[in-house]
Amino acid sequence: MSNDPRQQILSLSYDYQRKWLFRRDHELMLKAKKEFSDWDYVDQRLEWHARPEFHRDPEKSKVQPRKPLHLPRDPNYIPKQETMESLCFVTGASSNAPYFDLVVQLLESLKTTRWYADAPIKLLDCGLTADDKEYLIKRFGCEIKDPDWDINPFLIINKKKWGDINAFKGLVSRPYIHKHFPGYDYYFWLDADTWIQDDLTLDKMICIAEKNGLSITKDHDCFWGDETFFANPCITKHEANFLKHKDILTNSIYCIRIDIAEKYPPLCEEMLARRGRYQFGFDLASLNYLFYKETSGIVLQELHWHYLNIFSKGAKVDDAQNLYDLEGNLLGIICLAATLKLLPRRLLFANSDIGTDNIMAIQKAKQIAASKDAIFKETEAHIICKTHGWKQGSYFYRTYLDPELLCGKMEAWL
């Protein structure tokens, strides 16, 4: 190692950043400030440490947007011009953490695409403050609408489980988005906890919706009739037999044509009427039944396009490009599972080989997510990752950048 003390400090600082040991980097910078009071690098790092992890303005945030991925467009999957002119993207949001910063990152990722940056964005208000609504309108040009209640909220069971009942609007309003935002032929729904890495995925899903009426992807490796998945009492025996052994399809992301969309609410309402109260997943069951009944029933999307459950297989990160892939296939749209979205960025792991059989690791992640204090302690996060063989990383759109991307080459600071 060099005898130059500044070189030694830089090497240590870059090493700490690469390993996400930010507390150690902060302590190092405080010591370096006493010895090198006029060193610009130290001042820059101390300013960075004073930032919040997430800020609406990326320039004031510790985490930064990923570099946009612009791959060559596939000529076999380019939506028609008339489709593009009658397409909108729809999501829902509340001001509660972590959902507000997640929806900001979703919209940031959409705005960095080449072909869809100017597409209309519609947003269901599921508990937004006036300031947050104004921010989303000014920055992203969203049209925001409170959907009120498309089903009687008194039918919703386990209200205490869901906390803020307004947040539930996003779940029960998905079948009705064409009614809340009329005038389009194609509606592309994206949950607030998704983000777009590759806009070619949008191309392909929209083209499939043109031909099929509904493009949708598998919900990891589950099948209707699988005892490990929830039993839905809204489904009749006939419908259950019809769906049995078919892939369970997610309603976290899908693109739907208006003629199919209009058949979605009546089917939901019929299933809801049978039950007499809201049962979680009735909209998912309805959408699955609609897909298999009204379209060709061919699930064209591959698992790696929508990776809901990162425990199911080992997703890998290309550290050089800061990109996600699964078994060599690029992850076009990232969607965080319910538990994982609550984990802090420095703990949400990548480059791990955790399988569905690693129950202890999964349970530990759930315990961490439920914790109020321990998850934010860097030492605890580091020990947890080391214990389970996890590499600290991020599945969010905004992430901690490599020091050379954030600070530049070390030589520039000497």
Image (cartoon, helix red, strand yellow):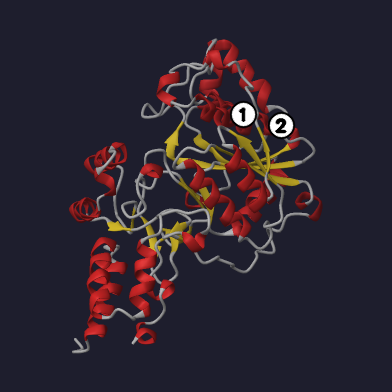
Which quarter of the image is occupied by the C terminus? bottom left
Q: Is 268 on the left-hand or right-hand side of 312?
A: right
Furthest residue in direction bottom, as rendered: 3
148 or 384: nearer the eye? 148
- Can the viewer see residue 298? no
Q: Amino acid at mark 2?
A: His
| Quadrant of res 251 | top right
Which quarter of the image is occupied by the N terminus? bottom left
Q: Position of residue 154 (x, y in %)?
A: 54, 13
Q: Compare marks 2 and 1 and give the one earlier in the sequence.
A: 1
Q: Amino acid at mark 1?
A: Ser
- Can the viewer see residue 120? yes
Q: Residue at x 40, y 55 (%)?
A: 53
Q: Residue at x 39, y 66 (%)?
A: 47
Q: Position of residue 153 (x, y in %)?
A: 56, 17
| Quadrant of res 28 | bottom left
Q: Which residue is mark 1?
A: 173
Q: Position of residue 225 (x, y in %)?
A: 44, 26
Tell me, for residue 180, which label it has, or none: 2
152 or 55: nearer the eye? 55
Q: Residue at x 79, y 51 (%)?
A: 85
Q: Is residue 169 above or below residue 272?
A: below
Q: Residue at x 27, y 65 (%)?
A: 26
Contact flag, marks 2 and 1 (Cβ < 8 Å): yes
Q: CA distance from mark 2 to mark 1?
A: 9 Å
Q: Is residue 324 above or below residue 163?
A: below
Dot 1: few (<14), some (14–19), or many (≥20) neighbours within 10 Å?
Answer: many
Tell me, for residue 6, which label it has, or none: none
Task: Name the element at disc 1.
Answer: loop
Q: Position of residue 67 (x, y in %)?
A: 51, 67
Dot 2: few (<14), some (14–19), or many (≥20) neighbours within 10 Å?
Answer: some
